[in-house]
Amino acid sequence: MIGEKKVLYSGMQATGTLTLGNYLGALKNWVGLSGEYECFYGVMDLHSLTLRQDPPAFRKNARSLYALYVAAGLDPEKNCIYYQSHVSAHAELGWLLCCFTYMGELSRMTQFKDKAAKHADNINAGLYTYPVLMAADILLYQADLVPVGVDQKQHLEICRDIATRFNNIFGDVFTIPEPYISASGAKIMSLQEPEHKMSKSDENPNATILLLDDTDTIIRKFKRAVTDSEHEIRYDQEKKPGISNLIDIYSVVTGKSRAEIEREFSDGGYGAFKLAVGEAVAAELKPLQARYQELLADKAYLDARIKENDEKAQYTANRTLRKVQKKLGLTERIR
Ligand code: ATP
Ligand code: LTN
C-alpha cells in the first residue's frame, strides 16, 4: 500500500514497435486500472539486453515506448512511468534474489526454452535469469497487482515463489503480488499463423499489426489474415483459429460479445468481416497515434516527466532495497 491505495506494477521490453497484442493484452488494461491503484510502469530496457540491440535504435525504441504508454492514456503526472535502467536498485535486488532462486526453477521457464531455441547463438545468462530481474522489478515496489498477458503467468508464479521463500526466512519483507490477466485480449494471435501469439519480433510483417501502422496498412493486413476454407463467422478456437482471433480482436475493440458479433456478421462473408475488423482497429488507434506524434515533438515535456518519475521510482525502490540489505546482514553504510 502507498497511502490509501494498493500498488500496481507492470512494464514492457523496449524492443521494436508495440503490436496490437501488446496493446490489447496489456496496455489497454493498464489504462483501465490506473485510477484505482498507485501505479508504476517501467520501460524494461535492462530486460531488452537479453537480445542483442543496436544502440541508437534501442535508445529510440525506449523513448518511443515511453511515449506510447502516455499516448495510450497513462498520465505521467499521475502514474510513475520510468526507465528501469535509471533505478539501479533493480539490478542490485536482481543479484540478491538470484541467490534465492534455484537453477531447476529457471530451467522450467517456457519463455527461456522458446527464446533459447530461437536464438541458439546467444543463450546468455541474462536470458536465463530474466525472471529473477522481473521478480526484483515487482517486489521493489511492493506491488499488489501485476497486469500482464497470459504468456507472463509463469514469471509471476516464480516471482511469488521467490518472495514467499524470502519472507519465510526473514519475515514479511515483500508483498506477494497477484497476477491480473484480463479474459479478453489476453492472447492475440498472429494474423498469418493464428496458432502462435502475435509477437513484435515476428519476421513476417503481415503477421502483426503495429500500433503505429497507418489505416491503409492495417486494413490491408487484416484483408490478408489467414482464416479457413469455410464461410461461417463462428467462434471455435480449435477448428477456426484465424476467425476466432479476429472475433476476439473485434470484441475487445468494440465491446461487443462473441455471440453478438456472430449474429452481426451471420450473412456476410469473410471479406466484409475482415474489413470491419480493420476499420475498427484503425479507428481505435488513430487518436493514440496523433497523441504519440505530439508527445515526441515536445521534448521538454517528456524529459521533465521522465526526470521526476525516475526520482519517484528511485525513492520507492531504494526503501525496499535497504530493508532487504539489512535483513540479509549486509553492513550498513556509514553516514
Ligand atoms: P517478443 O515477442 O519480442 O518476445 P512481446 O511482443 O511478447 O515480445 P513483451 O515486451 O514481452 O512483448 O510483452 C509486453 C506485454 O504484452 C506483456 O504483458 C505480454 O504478456 C503482452 N503481450 C505480448 N504479446 C501479446 C499478445 N499477442 N496477446 C496478448 N498480450 C500480449
Ligand atoms: N517480461 C515482461 C516484461 C516485464 C514485466 C516486468 C512485466 C519485465 N519486468 C515486471 C510486469 C512486471 C514481458 O512482458 N515480456
Image: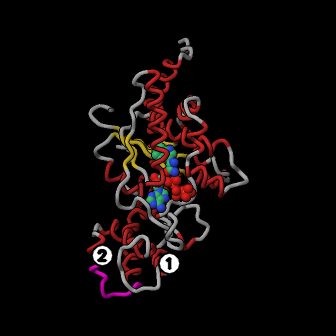
Residues 222 and 211: in front is 222
User: Residue at image x 35%, y 78%?
Assistant: 234
**x, y percentage for residue 188?**
44, 64
Q: In the displayed image of the protein, which residue is found farthest to the right?
A: 121
**x, y percentage for residue 37?**
31, 42
Residues 3 and 293: in front is 3
User: Is 119 on the left-hand or right-hand side of 333?
Assistant: right
User: Is 233 on the left-hand or right-hand side of 60?
Assistant: left
Q: Amino acid at mark 1?
A: Val
Q: Secondary structure at mark 1?
A: loop
Q: In the image, is residue 21 above or below residue 89?
A: below
Q: In the image, is residue 7 above or below residue 272?
A: above
User: Residue at image x 34%, y 43%?
Assistant: 78
Residue assigned mark 1: 226
Mark 2 sits near ligand 1, with its Cβ under 8 Å away: no
Residue assigned mark 2: 261
